[in-house]
Image: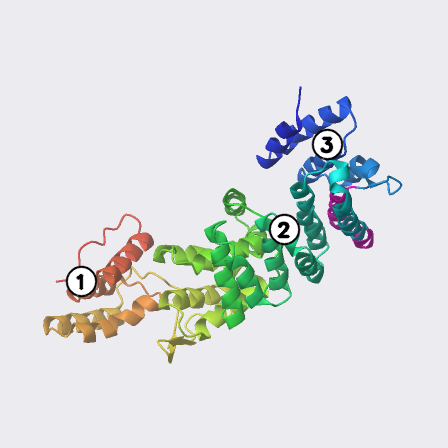
Amino acid sequence: MPTMDQGIELLQKKDFPGAEQVFTALLELEEDVSARNNLAMAIFLCGDAARVLAVLEPNLDLAQPRGNPFSFALAAQVLAALGRREEGRRHLDVAAALFERGKAYLEEMGIDRKSWHEYTITIMKGAAALEEHRLVFELYRRWERYHVSWENRYLAGIASFNLGRYGRAASLWGSLAQVGRFAMHMQQVAFLVERGLIPPFFLGYESLDSKDLKRMAQEAVREQSDAALARYAGSSAVRMALLSYLFSPEIAEKEIKGIMLPLILYGGEWGEAFGRRLLEAGGVPREFKLCAAFALVQRGIFKPGEPIPVIIDGMEQTITFTQKEVSLEPDPELDKLDQQARDLRKRGLYEDAVILLEPLFEQGRFYPPAMLTLATLYRDLKRHDQARKVLETMEEMLPGHRAGSGSS
């Protein structure tokens, strides 16, 4: 015989069709408000919003002596999804009123106080679905003493973020450190938006885990179209996840390009603004600035060969990218530059030689002889990480080419 616990477990595992079967079987045995609510939720999470209202209808009868806040809060979410916002707000108001009245007779109804207080999450989600950001935060503050889940604070943080209260959002997410590192990373993004490094953006209330994000990335890559990549980069959940990782201590240098390029290339006006702010900001790693400049050239914001103003180490400089990233043909001009660097190296003037060749690498002009000389110079100076970066870049740009030996 199916049980409520079995259905709830299936919901938690995101087996929504399986959960629907369990709750349907329970309702066939006897009418139950909770089973009907859970059945409606399973159907809603399957993406069939139109069918949910018919399932919920018996629970939305205001003639009942005592209604259930969850039913009306879920109906508000469904109506928001169907574009019926005014109806949704009316149902949400009923849910809030029922929650307030119900606190007085929980013992009479035989309902656990904690279970009743969990309804605050669903009611806040109803306000979130209607994009009533101020109401989401007001509900959080009004019922703060009743919250039993970290989700209440998480939702209040999103509402604050969307209201432009980034410091408050950072504070709310920062208090969720025990829940997971994602909250601390989101706090960092909120601080960076407040500082002006990251342009403001709307943040949706949907909760996506790492599996969801990975699936979305794979789908975008598999379709390989600008429209698919724009949908991916335009998702606020994806944007927050990518920004969270980009500015986290865990980011590896070789991962920067793969994370930053989708944000700038396919992020619309926000992506262009983000790229420009990276170029202009102080305290941003050089690798971030080079990647941002490259992406803006790819977008056509700057033309190939056009000097791009950028702040590096507190100084205004310019960098230039050409369309030709790797030159395999002999280049007399670059050969002359490479020879000058070799001559300086023979005289022990390693830093002077680096100054000649380093701009080529930073501008994306990967001329193999000069790059191998640069890698050798880095090794001479014990700057092994930079040497490795140059060699790894060469190997990526020239498949099958062994870039392990430098010039003599």
**Lateral position of residue 243 relative to residue 318, left or right:** right
* Residue 217, horizontal then vertical, whole percent: 51, 47
Disc on res. 147: 2
Q: Residue furthest left?
A: 347
Q: Quadrant of the N terminus?
A: top right
Query: Which colouring convention does the figure follow?
Result: rainbow
What residue range appears in magenta? 68-90
Determine if residue 196 is in view: no
Determine if residue 193 is in view: yes
Residue 181, placed above or below residue 358: above
Check disc 3: other Cα within 10 Å, few if <14, some if 14-19, many if 20+. many
Instruction: State the image quarter where residue 333 is shown.
Output: bottom left
Badge 3 marks a residue whose secondary structure is helix
Q: Is residue 161 magenta?
A: no
| Marks 1 and 3, how far apart at CA | 68 Å
Disc on res. 379: 1
**Residue at the image point whose x is 40% and y is 69% from the top:** 284
Check disc 1: other Cα within 10 Å, few if <14, some if 14-19, many if 20+. some
Please name whichever residue, 148 or 106, is drawn nearer the observer in this view of the structure. 106
State the residue position of label 3. 35
Amino acid of disc 2: His
Q: Earlier in the sequence, mark 1 or mark 2?
A: 2
Q: Earlier in the sequence, mark 2 or mark 3?
A: 3
Disc on res. 362: none
Please name whichever residue, 236 or 330, is drawn nearer the observer in this view of the structure. 236
Front label number (1 vs 3): 3
Front label number (1 vs 2): 2
Badge 2 marks a residue whose secondary structure is loop
Main SS category, magenta section: helix
Q: Are marks 1 and 2 in contact (CB under 8 Å)?
A: no
Q: Quadrant of the C terminus?
A: bottom left
Q: Earlier in the sequence, mark 1 or mark 3?
A: 3
